[in-house]
Image (cartoon, coloured by chain):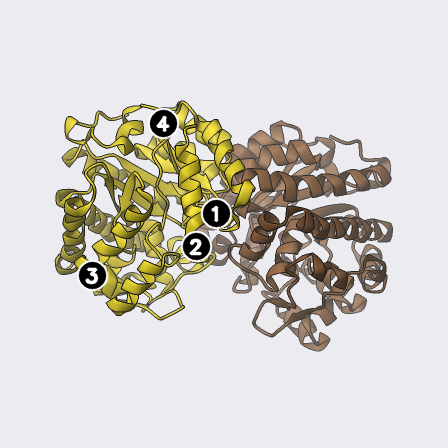
Chain colours: A yellow, B brown
Amino acid sequence: MQNFDAATVTYKFLAPFRGEAVSPPPVWLMRQAGRYLPEYRATRAEAGSFLDLCYNPKLAAEVTLQPIRRYGFDASILFSDILVVPDALGQSVRFAEGEGPRLDPIRDVAGLARLDLSKTGSKFALVWETVARLRQDLPPETCLIGFCGAPWTVATYMVEGRGSSDQAEARSWAYRDPDGFAQLIEVLTDASITYLSGQIEAGANVLQIFDSWAGSLAEDEFERWVIAPTTKIVRALRARYPHVPIMGFPKGATSQLKSFVAATGVDGVSCDTSCPLSIMRDVADAGKVVQGNLDPLLLVAGGAALDRRVDEILAALKGRPFIFNLGHGIVPETPPEHVAQLVKRVRRGA
Amino acid sequence: MQNFDAATVTYKFLAPFRGEAVSPPPVWLMRQAGRYLPEYRATRAEAGSFLDLCYNPKLAAEVTLQPIRRYGFDASILFSDILVVPDALGQSVRFAEGEGPRLDPIRDVAGLARLDLSKTGSKFALVWETVARLRQDLPPETCLIGFCGAPWTVATYMVEGRGSSDQAEARSWAYRDPDGFAQLIEVLTDASITYLSGQIEAGANVLQIFDSWAGSLAEDEFERWVIAPTTKIVRALRARYPHVPIMGFPKGATSQLKSFVAATGVDGVSCDTSCPLSIMRDVADAGKVVQGNLDPLLLVAGGAALDRRVDEILAALKGRPFIFNLGHGIVPETPPEHVAQLVKRVRRGA
């Protein structure tokens, strides 16, 4: 557990990172700024493409603030996308309406020539400006989370050219030519450090590294492509910004969560929906912050079953360094009133 | 650990189920009969649709035998599909070329009226005939594995109408109307017991229950939709056929593997590629058979890295009740000579 300095102690959200269990726990939701909110859809329509929105500091800050106004979450997460990094590196990203991201895939070492770390500044600067606006416009008690995608997960999109259910192209490259693939991971690791450093400089109070596809790797590959680059990022940031806590999210890799936490030195982890509460307790008892892990589909369903599961999660983590969250991002079908029900339930005091 | 009777002891494949570690271990590969083999593609072209092949005892037996002729695996697995069960129940299944399965989805209790357990016999009988042919045509030392999809996984296809990456429709129904969804699971559980019993009667020596989408469930849902129906199937079959070992495969649910094994009473489990070898060892040390877990993509890549990982897996499980296998099904791009390399490496004596 790090000692986070006095400049940040006003945020209730950061209490768990100082080893304090607060009751009720802090609460935020992954993708809390998003399509389930009518005000988001209105701003989105104004912005142009999805990436236009990510690169528009005024509008990106606006959508980030929307759920804070509605629900008063304890933390706000920068509205952006994990694919800003490859886009800024020169592998341009498109989002077709109703489809996922599309990139011209990079499938071998030769393709790395398309990436240029020195050119990321102009696009990163737009995101950093969003962060700066947010830190100014957010309520003083609301913590601001910066983020990036982990190198492995970002690489899977760059190599596949899109999302995929099995990350086969990236995993295959890594088997076929591990040294070449390592170069891609290294570029991403360095870009992530630059990107996150800028977010901290602009006002981010805490960071989260999203590794959405960490669960598809065999353990030796997990060690090389998830643990090693994450460790490098954590060390580099910790050296410069010891007061900023860093959370990991190796989604789908629950069985390797404890070794991930121990090896990378992250201050906390997000736990996905399938993570047993007993494992969350174990990680918390090892002195790390855990957040999670309500099923976003139960938030869609709502009702008494939602309250019941919220209570179960609260009871299981009571007295431990815990932040209430979903296990995955909120889905567009979520009724906004169910989010209100959730926040009320969490805050009624566990 | 069950006592499997003397009728089955001739199969080397079953030695681990008697608690015996054999060196080299038995070996088979998930989807060992499949598109990576030119002789499979030839038979497939002859058969008509994919389901036509599943329901053609002569041709289904032929494709099942093909990899045994090439590689002499210790076990043969019935060539069929987990969607035979809904198809036989009356929710007809189509496989469009190059796409996955398509079904007219069942999304609520009213849709269950389309299913009729009493009508499954005619289609199940074709599969049972395949099993009977196989038991006659296989080399006497080759164990025959029967299988079905687990109720949860089969239900996800029935509710979605196709494969999906998050099983959202099925999970949502289960949240919205758990008692209604339980009726679907119950029909599938009963159909699976009938289907597997017939496979045993026809000559299957061991069974595997594939729960490919077990990993998407929160732990309380996992308990209800994965553990409970699997337990019911295991108990029903064990009561009638105590000499037939049953393996589970709750894919993606490694963090709940130990409780799955303990609660369901399966004799062994398949472990997916992301399962750490230490967890496989723990399960084996608890007296259960483990099989796995080489990455199918490493089998595509081949070379020295393949040999190295095979050796690591063998070394980690040496002296324990272990069956060598992949962590997922073999992929169509696999060079057949890499499979030969793999089998040779496993058998050179760990």
User: Is residue A175 visible to us here?
Assistant: yes
Question: What residue is at 26 percent from the left and 70 percent from the top?
Answer: A48
Q: CA distance from mark 3 to mark 2?
A: 23 Å
Q: CA distance from mark 4 to mark 3?
A: 34 Å
Q: CA distance from mark 4 to mark 1?
A: 23 Å
The label nearer to you, 3 versus 2, is 2
Amino acid type at image mark 2: Val
Q: Earlier in the sequence, mark 1 or mark 2?
A: 1
Label 3 secondary element: loop
Q: Are marks 2 and 4 in contact (CB under 8 Å)?
A: no
Quadrant assignment for the C terminus of chain B: top right
Amino acid type at image mark 4: Pro
User: Circle 2 sits on which residue?
Assistant: A331
User: Circle 4 sits on which residue?
Assistant: A321
Amino acid type at image mark 3: Tyr
Mark 1, residues whose alpha carbon is within 10 Å: few (<14), some, or many (≥20)?
many
**Residue A200, quarter of the rendered image:** top left
Label 2 secondary element: loop
**Residue B66, quarter of the rendered image:** bottom right
Q: Earlier in the sequence, mark 4 or mark 1?
A: 1
Percent of width and height locating residue A100 = 38, 65
Q: Earlier in the sequence, mark 2 or mark 4?
A: 4
**So how many labels did they put on this image?**
4
Q: Are marks 4 and 1 in contact (CB under 8 Å)?
A: no
